[in-house]
Every structure is written in structure tokens, then in C-alpha cells.
Image (spheres, grey):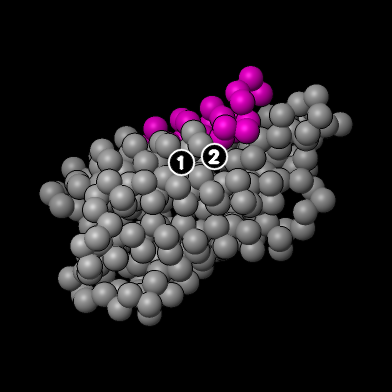
Amino acid sequence: MSSVPDCIEEDIGKVEEGAVAAGSARKDPLICPSVSITLVQKVVAEAIGAFFMVFAGCGAVAVDKKYGSVTFPGICITWGLIVTVMVYSVGHISGAHFNPAVTITFTVLKRFPWKQLPLYIMAQLLGATLGSGVLYLIVNPKPEQFYGTVPVGSAMQSFVLEIIISFLLMFVISGVATDTRAIGELAGIAVGSTILLNVFIAGPISGASMNPARSVGPALVMHRYESLWVYIAGPIGGA
């Protein structure tokens, strides 16, 4: 099986694995990185990205619940900023997925190699869990100060909302990552802004996960699994 996604095989002379190379064509930073980068480097980059995403984003939630100093707008901004920063930091290495739903969707659409799917998902889950664990050790939240995601209303309400906001996120990612007419340099800003917007909209209702790893990490660390299926099935279904 070729490591280059089928959708861009016609550009094989100018393609980095899953991403159009620099030069006459634009690099797609949110799909796959260069073939010159080893799989180990990609997997490590995904784990690091997921680690800091959860550490910073969930950290804002944890600090606000314990000390009350971040505020809801601050939490939204933190999520948007950390995603933006990590996209620009490691997007050229791993493609900056950080999200099993994104990786699965690109794989199904043949824009990402199937053989790398399990390793990417394991790296994302590991990074998110480690980030959540380190955060727990530092902040030491009480059980009621859970920084994961649980529905405020019904599970079905949150499930539907997760599908909608995950669809919006994937719509934006697909637009900035796969359309060569888009301005690739703005991909991180576009994706981060979408995260910020979605957290503003859905945060008070579902927690605005959009990412199974973001929800599974804190759930494993703090042993809270109620309605976890919402944050696994919802983002994958929406994406």
C-alpha cells in the first residue's frame, strides 16, 4: 500500500506523505507530514501535541474550578490558543491531528494511511492521559472538580451537540488542509478559532469535547466514566 494518500497521487512528484510539498504547491499541515520524517517522530509529535492540548485546555478548567480565576471566556480562549500553537509547532511533523476522530475521518477518506491509524490513535490517547495525569498531580482537584466532560443536560442532548460541533470542526479542517486554494499558513488560526467558537457554544452544555482523547484522558485519571460514550461516538460520528 502506498504511503501517499490516493487523493493526491497525481501530484506524486511534489507530494510529501499526505501533504503537498512546499514550492509550487501548498503543504497540507493537517493531514500527513513529509516522507523524510520517520513514523516514530510522527507518533511522538502526536503524543506531545495531545499532552499539551489536554494539559493546557483541561488545566484552564481545573484551575477555574479550584481557584475561580480563569473564567469561562478564559477557558474558551485557552483551548483555542493551545490548539493553534500546537498546530504550528508539530503540524509539519505529524500533521497535527491530536484527535482520533480527525485521524479516523482522514483515513476513511483515503487521505491518511490505514497502517498508521492505530499508532496515531494510541499516541493521542497516551498523550492525553499523561497530560491529564500530570495536571492532576499538580492541581490535585477534588472529585467534584472534574476537568473532563460530562453532560449538563441529557446524554442525548450532548450527543447531538457533539456531532454538530465536531462536524463544524472537521469541515474547517478539511477546507484548510485539503483544498490547495486555501491559505495553508492560516490553518492553525482557522482551526484554533473554530475550537474557541465551539467551546463558547457547547461548553456549558456538553463540555465541547470534539475529541475522544480529550475526554478519555481525564476520565481514566479521575475514574469518571458516566456518558463517556457520548464523547467517543459523537465526535467520530460528526467528523
Other residues around mark 2 within 10 Å, as few (<14) / some (14–19) / many (≥20): many
As drawn, 111 above or below 231:
above
The amino acid type, in three-letter code, at marker 2 is Gly
Q: Is residue 89 left or right of residue 81?
A: right
Other residues around mark 1 within 10 Å, as few (<14) / some (14–19) / many (≥20): many
The x and y percentages for residue 72 are 24, 50
Picture residue at 19% right of the left edge, 46% below the top? 205
Picture residue at 32% right of the left edge, 67% below the top? 219
The x and y percentages for residue 145 are 21, 69
The x and y percentages for residue 225 are 27, 66
> Which residue is under mark 1?
192
Pointers 1 and 2 in contact (C-beta within 8 Å): yes
Magenta region, residue range: 167-188
Quarter of the picture containing the C terminus is top left
As drawn, 232 above or below 222:
above
Q: Secondary structure at mark 2?
A: helix
Q: Is residue 149 visible?
A: no
Give me the C-alpha separation between circle 1 and circle 2.
Answer: 6 Å
Q: Is residue 40 left or right of residue 213?
A: right
Q: Is residue 2 left or right of residue 106?
A: right
Residue closer to the observer: 43 or 135: 135
Q: Secondary structure at mark 1?
A: helix
Task: Label the magenta part by its dominant secondary structure.
Answer: helix
- Residue extending farthest to the top is 181
Q: Is residue 136 left or right of residue 69?
A: right
Picture residue at 52% right of the left edge, 53% below the top? 98
Mark drawn on residue 188: 2
